[in-house]
Image (cartoon, rainbow, N blue to C red):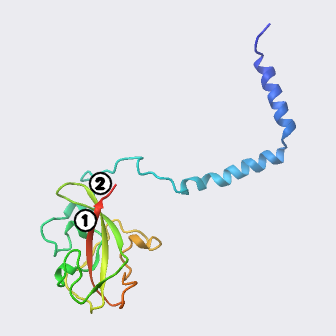
Amino acid sequence: MKKFDTDAIGETLLRKFAGRTSRRGILSRLGLAVVAAPVFPLLPVSRADAAKPDRSPEAKTAFARNAQTKDDTKCDYWRYCAIDGALCTCCGGGMHTCPAGAEPSPVSWVGTCINPDDGKAYLIAYRDCCGKPACGQCGCDNTDRETQIYVPQFNNNIIWCFGTSSMEYHCSTAVLVGPAG
């Protein structure tokens, strides 16, 4: 005599399952699974620990491969990877200060730039200085890793003078926030 008759156990389980469910119920659940399955990759899941960022020279963008750390009045300065506009360093201000008479915007866009000296990525906040006529010097349009306009905090094509007394754009600053990831 067999201790376990797997065929009989399987038959019993399937008969109980069939007695408690209907074909329509099974088909509706299967249809729901087929419709819902493509949505799962869109759910907000933290993938920060999934993989280390590739900082090899081949993985760097064209801007990161050619960036320099000596002259902050040039568009290829490493902090300017996502800046768009006139550099405040050429307009009487500093890398993180507005020139006299210009007011810093309380909002900014951000970029992640790689410092060629240490090979590490840093978060940079770009802030427009407003309230004076456009400087017109050292105009840069760097779009390294620029995102679509539907993610405005990462897009540099917007005049970011919101919250200032004047929407008149003068120049842009690049403030080092800290190490990225």
Q: Residue 76 vs residue 156: left or right?
A: left
Q: Residue at x 76, y 15 (%)?
A: 4
Q: Amino acid type of disc 1?
A: Phe
Instruction: Indicate the quadrant containing the N terminus: top left, top right, bottom left or bottom right.
Output: top right
SS for callout 1: helix
Left or right of 93 on screen, residue 19 = right
State the residue at coordinates (27%, 91%): 132
**Snapshot quadrant of residue 16:** top right
Q: Where is residue 2, by image quadrant?
A: top right
User: Label 1: which residue?
Assistant: 63
Point out residue 8 in the picture as x, y percentages from the top left corner. Answer: 81, 21
The quarter of the image holding the C terminus is bottom left
Q: Position of residue 95 (x, y in %)?
A: 21, 74
For image coordinates 23% across by 88% down, the residue present is 135
- Distance from the alpha carbon under mark 2 to that under mark 1: 11 Å
Q: Nearer the viewer, residue 97 or 87?
A: 97
